[in-house]
Image (cartoon, rainbow, N blue to C red):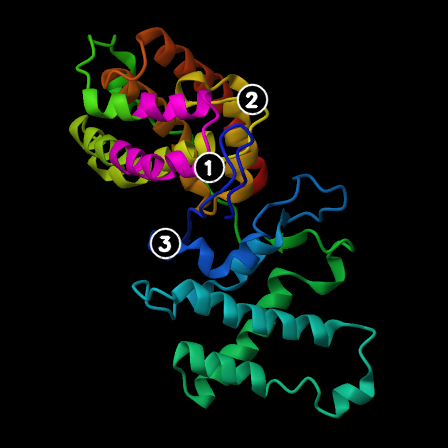
Amino acid sequence: MTKKKKKSAGKKKKSAKTRTSNAQGRTWAASGSEFDSLMELVGRPMMDHPDLPEGFQEVGLMEAMTEFGKPIMDLIDPNDRKGMKKLFEVATAIWTYTILIEDPDEDEDELDAGVLDPEPVIKIIKKQLKLDQNQATELFYMMLERKEYLFPSDIQPESGLALFLRNEGPSAITEFDYSRIEILDIPAAPPVPDANLASMMNQMDQYIYDQAEYDDWESDFFYMEKECTGIFSSWIEEIGLPEFYEEFAFYAQMFIEFVYQHEHPEVVVLKSVSPVNLEEFLFNYVLRKVMIEPDEYVNIPPALKLFYRFLYEKGYLDENQSNSIIKHIGDLEPGFIDALRKKFG
């Protein structure tokens, strides 16, 4: 995703890592600078398009391309540093070809003359995916069929700003089992502060309050983010949730970046997030810009609740601040689950 400039905090922004999922989950991580032009398309359209056919969901072009390209993703080594770039080069070439052959205004003489010869696209597939001629040709025609199946050309909206994606099967959106997080039901003990972490986070807040130039705090921000999410992931393991340490740390990182690097109409830091900020994060930022498996979205509210308990225990927040924000997250959670079921269920 491409970061927006925070009005109150400076001029220059650094593209954060953009994550998506392959068959094993959140294992893709690539620098956004490699394909910023594509990331400009990442925003999803508003849900509930008036002409949305039954059995389809409305998606933005970036999400459509990601879903379309899943078979290609499976052919790319997840350790390949340029894997995402290869994925989008191949997917874009095939997608563009389908648009041209579907264009009713395309000159039939040009088509007959071979202007839309598939061989250049197949050549790109061979080069980027290291396939032979037969394998590349087979993948090419399979992807043409996949495009028409997922995005039937005769039902797509005219604007081109949104696409209707076929739901390939309902996803089970079930509420998080909070019996696994007993710590949230236990009165908080006096905190055992992490003086270094609290100091880094308070210093970051001061930069925002002072409207410091981004260059003055960029390196401090990324160091604080790394330290905070690293300590939080260890804390998740310590409270008995080792299977969630990586996932919950990812959501915490995502939220930190939303708070400090997303554009807000007012000054916002972690200790001052409001119900409006939380609603914006869950219902807009998450549902539009975060691409994870449907059943994983339900883990975001509990991750945020634990994150705010963690911030109290480490001395960054007082107990009232922590409890108030945790309550706001809980108040929004049922509506968030309903939105997920409406979109994916």
Disc 1 crowd rating (10 Å Cα; few below 14, some 14-19, many 20+) is: some
* Residue that mark 3 sits on: 29
- In the rendered structure, which disc, 3 or 2, sits on the residue that comes first in sequence? 3
Q: Which residue is mark 2?
A: 266
Residue 342 lies within the magenta run: no
Q: Give the percent coordinates (x, y) of residue 77.
A: 32, 68
Residue 181 visible in the current orientation? no
| Helix, strand or loop for disc 2 | loop
Residue 279 lies, in percent from the top left, at 54, 25
> In the rendered view, would you say 229 is above or below 197?
below
Instruction: Please identify, in this view, whether the residue under mark 3 or under mark 1 is nearer the observer.
Output: 3
Q: Earlier in the sequence, mark 3 or mark 1?
A: 3
Task: Between residue 257 and residue 214, name the one nearer to us.
Answer: 214
Q: What residue is rendered at 41% in x and 88% in y? A: 132
Location of residue 255 by image quarter? top left
In this rendering, the answer to whether 112 lies above or below 299 is below
User: Which quadrant of the figure has residue 177?
Assistant: top left
Contact (CB < 8 A) between labels 2 and 1? no
Image side of residue 237 versus residue 221, left or right = left
The alpha-carbon separation of the residues under discs 3 and 1 comes to 26 Å
Report helix, strand or loop for mark 1.
loop
Few, some or many C-alpha atoms within 10 Å of disc 3 (few <14, some 14-19, many ≥20)?
A: some
Q: Which residue is mark 1?
A: 173
C-alpha gap between disc 3 and disc 2: 31 Å
Name the residue rendered at 52%, 46% in the picture. Answer: 170
* Main SS, magenta residues: helix
Q: Look at the image and give the residue range highlighted in magenta.
A: 201-228
Q: Position of residue 15 (x, y in %)?
A: 45, 48
Mark 2 is on which residue type? Answer: Glu
Q: Residue at x 58, y 40 (%)?
A: 343
